[in-house]
Amino acid sequence: MKRNYDKTFPVRRNSVYRHVETGLVVYRAVGPEWRRFGTPMRKRPLTSVVLDDGVANSIVNDFQEYTERGIPYRRGYLFYGPPGSGKSSFIAALASYFGYSVCMLSLSERTLDDDRLNHLLNTPPPYSVVVLEDVDAAFGSRDDPVQSAKAYEGLTRVTFSGLLNAIDGVASADERILFMTTNHIDRLDPALIRPGRVDVKQYFGYCTETMFSEVYFLFNFTKCL
């Protein structure tokens, strides 16, 4: 019996996505500026990242709505769940789908301070998303009794208030799309992930039986005749 693997995502409007490049461009922070990292990567199809039913379409629809409105905006996404569950892969696929580049930034970088973080978050290249991976590794919760004040402040040169101001302070830029990922959402301070800083929270879990089946048919559907 033949089984077709098919997922339908919204149609992108050509007038909006004329900036699309042939590959996925990745930027890294070098000093106070963003620089291209290597050569453009091969774009990753959305269908190559298998998630629970409805998750991919929900995020795609949300992303498209806020990129096509043509009004000043900031949008924040938090992807959380165990390692290897597809958080970073889906960001790459989403950026590929919409023709956006990806700006990777590590909060644990020792040369990063509040001023540089604020500048980088608010001067991304056009048509790009900013990704803060494993944000829990830099900042935990101020309410966690296990973490002393010294440990909380000593993980990075960036202060917690500096991060909050960079995300949505008075000087924060419009038309910026920010993704944060974490393996431990329970370790994040509630102030960091409140509405307005994080608009969409999405859990990425382990593979279910249905997801295993989709992965199988994704790579073997031509043999299932």
Image (spheres, rainbow, N blue to C red):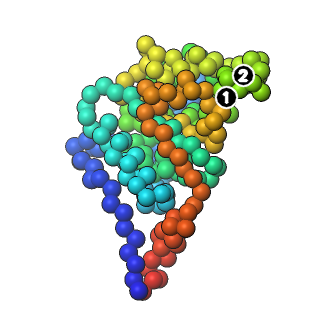
Residue at x-position 49% and y-position 44%: 202
Circle 1 Cα neighbour tier, 10 Å, few/some/many (<14 / 14–19 / ≥20): many
Say which of 44 and 167 sits in front.
167
| Res 189 visible | yes
Q: Which mark is residue 4?
A: none
Label 2–label 1 contact, CB within 8 A: yes
Identify the image quadrant of residue 188: top right
Q: Residue 135's x, y, as percent?
A: 61, 33
Q: Residue 35's x, y, as percent?
A: 52, 33
Q: Secondary structure at mark 2?
A: helix
The residue tagged 1 is: 140
Given the current orientation, which residue lies at the most extreme top position?
170
Q: Is residue 86 above or below residue 127?
A: below
Given the current orientation, which residue lies at the most extreme left position?
15
| Res 156 visible | no
Closer to the chain start, of discs 2 and 1, is 1
Q: Amino acid at mark 1?
A: Gly
Give the left or right position of residue 15, taking residue 121 as reference: left
Say which of 200 and 113 sits in front.
200
The residue tagged 2 is: 152
Residue at x-position 54% and y-position 50%: 204
Q: Amino acid at mark 2?
A: Tyr
